[in-house]
Image: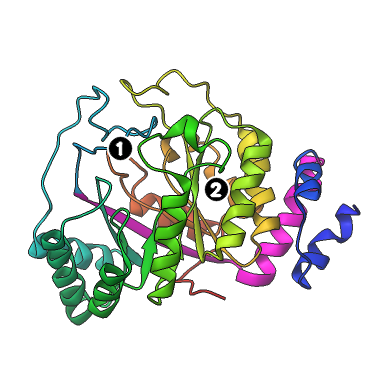
Amino acid sequence: MQLEKLAEKIISGYVLTKDEALELYKAPIDVLKESASKITKHFFKDDLELCCISNGKCGKCSEDCKFCAQSRFYNTQIETSPLKTVEEFVAEAKESFEKHIHRYSIVTAGVRLSKAEIDVIAKAFKKIKEEVGIASCGSLGLLDFDDFVKLKESGMARYHCNIETSPNYFKSICTTHSMEDKDATIKAAKKAGLQICSGCIIGMGESVEDRVDIALHLRDLKVDSTPINILNPIAGTPLEHQAPLTEEEIERTIAVFRHILPKVVLRLAGGRLKIQSFYTKLYDFGINSQITGDMLTTAGLTVACDIHNAISLNKTLKRIDPL
């Protein structure tokens, strides 16, 4: 594989194979960076999209995802809370819009919401569409097709459902639902006409091959946006003592994702405080979006900080729609 010409091939439509992606991961870091940057700039120029998430319903989750502070299986000492009101969601969306954030996403704990809870969120999305205008997204669990139709008609444009890790490694991370459940949810959301946001957490003990398989699986699912979370080990969870990834491991992983998913928005998500000393370098390895502000149960970087850093690097802050 001629790395010097790989970016041009991918820009022209070449689809990377698994063996090529595994070989690419081991390439000289400067060559990898240059190739990933060339692909990103071709499809996205210097555009950078900001989104934020609302912890719409927190804790007491029935699932046993080993990274998650909200699982009732683990003693993580977080504060739990019921579903927020329509008024609270609308107020948050307005505040986000005024801060020049491009997307606002409601995230809820639990495997799925009740129909009554979906009604509340549908009303919130409808008011946000009418009164605010910010792009609305949802991360609401393993819903069905009818739920997605209702939410789309209410104003939700994009659905988020992380696959978390590779199909092979999934059972090592979660046993209460399956990768097949995730896939079915994503396909139902896509059938309802929603854009798809789906990604992963890296640094959970998965192999390099697993990381390549994550990107390949997301390519098969034809997602529009891929959040890449860096594990932030939470005390009380099974992964609390997991060793952190190195800066280079993170850079290599993101660059390989960019080569496999050239037209997908790669979104830097959770764990940003762990990498705050070098996170802007990741723009050169394929990142062209990020979750700004706080995460669900952990702190993030401020919106003002993210905007300042982006402008200082000559990024154009704008919403990025699917190519």
In the foreground, 210 or 46:
210
Examine the rendering and report whether any part of residue 91 can be seen: no
Quadrant of the rendered image containing residue 188: bottom left
Mark 1: which secondary structure? loop
Q: State how far apart marks 2 and 1 are (Cα).
A: 33 Å
Instruction: Name the kind of residue labelled 2 in the image.
Output: Thr
**Disc on res. 280:** 2
**Crowdedness near tag 2: few (<14), some (14–19) or many (≥20) residues, C-alpha within 10 Å:** some
Question: Residue, x 40% and y 34% (percent of image)?
Answer: 175
- Tell me what residue is drawn at x 35 percent, y 37 percent: 176
Q: Which mark is residue 309?
A: none
Figure quadrant of the C terminus: bottom right
Q: Is residue 274 left or right of residue 30?
A: left
- Residue 111 rendering spot, x and y as whole percentages: 28, 47
In the image: residue 7, left or right of residue 227 = right
Who's the residue at 51% across and 36% down the image? 277
> Could you say which quadrant of the image residue 91 lies in?
bottom left
The range drawn in magenta is 27-56
Is 194 above or below relative to 81?
below
Q: Earlier in the sequence, mark 2 or mark 1?
A: 1
Give the image location of residue 128, x and y in percent. Answer: 20, 73
Residue pointed to by mark 1: 63
Q: Is residue 175 visible?
A: yes
- Residue placed furthest toward the top: 241
CB-based contact (under 8 Å), mark 2 and mark 1: no
